Image (cartoon, coloured by chain):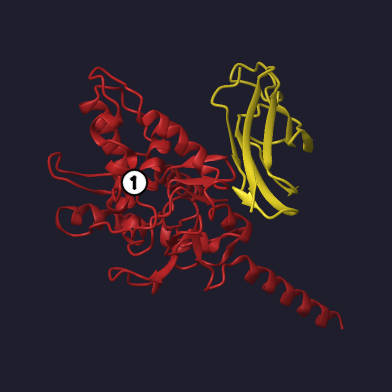
Amino acid sequence: MASGVKPRVKVPKSAAAGEAVTIKTLISHKMESGQRKDSDGNLIPRSIINRFTCDFNGANVIDVTLEPAISTNPYFEFEAKVDAAGEFKFTWYDDDGSVYEDAKSIAIG
Amino acid sequence: MKLKSLTSAIAVLALGAGAAAAAEDSQLIINGETEIVTWTKAPEHMENVDEIRSGWTFRSEETQALQMDDFDNPGMIFVDQARETWDQVDGSEGKSCASCHGTPEEGMAGVRAVYPKWNEAAGEVRTLEMQINDCRENRMGAEKWGYTSGSIVNMTALITLQSRGMPVNVAIDGPVKETWEQGKELYYTRTGQLELSCANCHEDNYDNLIRADHLSQGQINGFPAYRLKNAKLNSVHARFKGCVRDTRAETYSPGSDEFIALELYVASRGNGLSVEGPSVRN
């Protein structure tokens, strides 16, 4: 079980209809690659976030597969076109089966 | 012809080096509201430098941008961790930081800007780390943190944040004078097999490249600093240790009298710059 995991998201509160807004996300996670050894020479088991998705009003915006070479506290910044008011839903999937979620709503105006 | 293409290659190189440095008018404004002084007149006591510059002005545009928004600043993750620690009760007295100091915003505004400073009761110059550990030991009845441990560096980041944007203003006279003089002495003393003093790089050669590194003035107004190379916050003494090691010398220990004196002196060289921590550096 990874500890100290905390998702963060930054989404503007409002946008003009049809505007592409910038979304920033970051999750604190150690992203243990599975290739390092501890001081006794034993392999430290892999523990990473392996998938990240963002949906807007049920439609998928981005779906990312993460690999072990991605460093600690993965950060994603991307744009999404907003046609109507609604809610962004963010989901991170951990190797250990945990799922971390966050949501942010956006208004038109 | 060959010679001509060589000169143009040099011109391109020089241009490239110039682009790595910040333009004199580039400005650091954090979250679109906190204006940071990164370039100003040197304090009176500095004999060989006219203008002091934050390490931020020496970094690439990409690294600089990371510090302009707290969401992008990876150091803020560690500030959040310290915020949790701030409210946690620890030790035999049943106290947390919050028991005496309230919220960090209430209790810690302006603190970083004047450290290291003289502690009258103890009769010594104290760094922020020493003060935190004194609180833990004597007021909370908790165990001291290691001088450069994650817990203490993160806590100094939380405290530093409450002074961000205020000018660094450490005292150099009165009871601290002797320690300050000792720090100055250390700053100009060559150490190690390479026989380098702090001044050789950070006073004589700042803004030059030392192999691939763009040398800064070695200001510490941005500490603790999140370094991209190790993905965590780094304390002043840990950085000092790295620097002295790079001269191929046996280093002083973090928390030693020598580094405390050096911290006071180096901090005073930044009097007038804004407190900037937690900053982002490479």
Question: Which chain comes out red in the rendered image?
Answer: B
Above/below status of B277 relative to B184: above
Asked where in the image residue B52 lies, by quadrant, the reply is bottom left
Above/below status of B105 relative to B209: above
Residue B72 pos. (x, y %): 58, 47
Q: Residue at x 25, y 32 (%)?
A: B135
**Residue B254 visible in this rendered orientation of the protein:** yes
| In this picture, residue B133 sits left or right of residue B234 | left
Residue B239 pos. (x, y %): 45, 46
Dot 1 alpha-carbon crowd within 10 angstroms: few under 14, some 14 to 19, many 20 or more: many
Q: Residue at x 31, y 56 (%)?
A: B265
Above/below status of B85 relative to B112: above
Nearer to us in this view, B31 or A43: B31
User: Disc 1 marks which amino acid?
Assistant: Phe
Number of on-image labels: 1
| In this picture, residue A40 sits left or right of residue A80 | left
Callout 1: chain: B
Residue A3 pos. (x, y %): 56, 22
Which residue lies under the disc numbered 1? B259
The secondary structure type at the circle numbered 1 is: helix
